[in-house]
Amino acid sequence: MGRELDNSSNNHWIEQFIRHRNITSLDRRIVVTLIERVLIFRDRWVEIVYRWHNEFEWQAELVEQAQKLLSEKEAV
């Protein structure tokens, strides 16, 4: 866990995803807010890279580690 958990500025990305969680169509504002880039490959494969994808992965790892610790405590 090389990063510190900061509840102020680092959670801006969570607020953006919550704000847009029930969208039914995309407009320019939503795309600019949530998507960092769209990669289109020759074999008709598309990759969407979201803004804050590293923060999401980091948070998911924290949750996984916490679940492991809880499981180990319950086993003792």
Image (cartoon, rainbow, N blue to C red):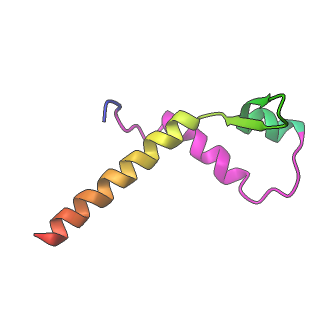
From the top left corner, tell me how far across and down residue 57 is, in percent: 49, 41
Number of dots carrying numbers: 0
Q: Quadrant of residue 69?
A: bottom left
- The residue at the point 10 percent across, 69 percent down is 76
From the top left corner, tell me how far across and down residue 46 is, in percent: 79, 37
The quarter of the picture where the N terminus appears is top left
Q: Is residue 52 magenta?
A: no
Of residues 7 and 14, the one drawn nearer to the viewer in this rendering: 14
Q: Which residues are magenta?
A: 4-27
From the top left corner, tell me how far across and down residue 55 is, in percent: 51, 37
- The residue at the point 18 percent across, 63 percent down is 72
- The residue at the point 31 percent across, 30 percent down is 2
Of residues 41 and 73, the one drawn nearer to the viewer in this rendering: 41
Left or right of 15? Residue 37 is right
Q: Residue furthest left?
A: 76
User: 14 above or below 32?
Assistant: below
Q: Quadrant of residue 30?
A: top right
Q: Is residue 11 magenta?
A: yes
- The residue at the point 85 percent across, 37 percent down is 44
Left or right of 10? Residue 23 is right
From the top left corner, tell me how far across and down residue 40 is, in percent: 82, 30
